Image: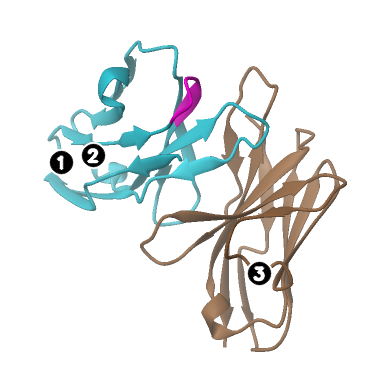
Amino acid sequence: GAVVSQHPSRVICKSGTSVKIECRSLDFQATTMFWYRQFPKKSLMLMATSNEGSKATYEQGVEKDKFLINHASLTLSTLTVTSAHPEDSSFYICSVSEQGSLAYGYTFGSGTRLTVV
Amino acid sequence: AQKVTQAQTEISVVEKEDVTLDCVYETRDTTYYLFWYKQPPSGELVFLIRRNSFDEQNEISGRYSWNFQKSTSSFNFTITASQVVDSAVYFCALSRMDSSYKLIFGSGTRLLVRP
């Protein structure tokens, strides 16, 4: 399957600042990437579908202006948490969907643990 | 609507015991994919298996086996002779075969294998 690199793995930021998380598909041209959020001991909640060259599709209840997604190339999608607050502290994971591939599946990044203080 | 239910929140077994993790799904689609992922304490998601809805053959991979029953909308996962390293959270997930390809996760089952 695809190899997905996600950075940073951990970040601590001050309340009110913005944080950018990168998700790179190293060996697969990903037209679609997904961003998930996971609270402690909870399941993964899909936040948005990132589409290369177009606007992301957000799930109901996810603030577009708070969680900015950019998918400018087939190998990179970024999630920016703007004006972060302590309630944004969470584990964020990106995923690449290998649509059209015989090895179709989803490969996940290693995740980013965001702590807002 | 699509939904994945993992009724077992936590399971604790002693090493070498067999354990089955249940997964029940709901979908109106006639074709779909089912997945199992493992999430160890480090947090990354490890792919275990993908099953197409039109392939009901059970699968075995080493100590892991999966039982897909379309009639009961279940896709259960069994670990034989469990080991401490199997301790993790296991997620069952469902994906449509359409342009969205969104992956819908169950709530996960936390497995603790004690020595």
Q: Secondary structure at mark 1?
A: loop
> Percent position (x, y) of residue A99?
68, 28
Residue at 41 percent across and 55 percent down: it is A43
Please give left or right for residue A12 compared with residue B3 in the image: right
Report if residue B115 is visible in the image.
no
Which residue has dot 3 on it?
A63
Residue B15 disc label:
1
Instruction: Choose mark 3 or mark 2, whichever is in front.
Output: 3
The magenta stretch spans which residues? Answer: B28-34
Which residue has dot 2 on it?
B83
Q: Secondary structure at mark 3?
A: loop
> Percent position (x, y) of residue B94?
46, 35
Residue at 73 percent across and 40 percent down: it is A32
Q: Chain of mark 1?
A: B
> Percent position (x, y) of residue B107?
35, 51
Please name whichever residue, A35 or B2, is drawn nearer the observer in this view of the structure.
B2
Report if residue B54 is visible in the image.
yes
Chain A display color: brown
Chain B display color: cyan
